[in-house]
Amino acid sequence: MLMFRYVYVFVLIMHSLIHLVGFAKAFDYRNIPMLTTISKPMGILWFSAAILFIAAACMLMGSQHIWWIAVLLAVIISELVIVVSWQDAKLGTIVNLLVLTGLIVLIFVM
């Protein structure tokens, strides 16, 4: 089960990094021509999801019992920004479903 936890943390961190791309696009930190325009308020939400995914990964590795709350908040914000940028980010919904599935597995096994 420990290996599953490590894989899950890896997925959370990778998903977080993808959210940072949306943030970078919104604030013109990088020229990302494949993405459509993202407003600055939406960029803050992209960043918030990234931070929550990282926080959840850290809390899970540190055996904090409230890690799952950070995951749920991150997925909710993530899905919101995905819906708003659907053409560019629709595959993120699949990752969010995987994250939720892993959350359920870890809650019932831990």
Image: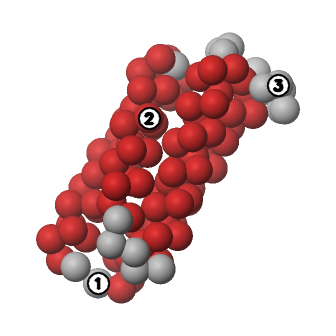
Tag 1: Cα neighbours inside 10 Å, few (<14), some, or many (≥20)?
few
Report the residue marked by disc 1.
1
- Residue depicted at x 42% and y 26%: 80
Report the residue marked by disc 2.
77
Q: Is residue 102 above or below residue 30?
A: below
Name the secondary structure under disc 1: loop
* Amino acid type of the residue that numbered disc 2 sits on in the rendered structure: Ile
Closest to the observer: 96 or 72? 72
Question: Is there CB contact under 8 Å for labels 1 and 3?
Answer: no
Counting from the top left corner in percent of width and height, residue 73 is at 39, 44
Alpha carbon separation for disc pair 3 and 2: 21 Å
Residue 6 appears in the rendering: no
Name the secondary structure under disc 2: helix
Q: Earlier in the sequence, mark 1 or mark 2?
A: 1
Report the residue marked by disc 3.
28
- Specify the quadrant of the image occupied by residue 67: bottom left
Counting from the top left corner in percent of width and height, residue 14 is at 56, 56
In screen coordinates, is 79 left or right of 14? left
In screen coordinates, is 98 left or right of 12? left
Q: Earlier in the sequence, mark 1 or mark 3?
A: 1
* Amino acid type of the residue that numbered disc 3 sits on in the rendered structure: Asp
Residue 5 appears in the rendering: yes
* Amino acid type of the residue that numbered disc 1 sits on in the rendered structure: Met
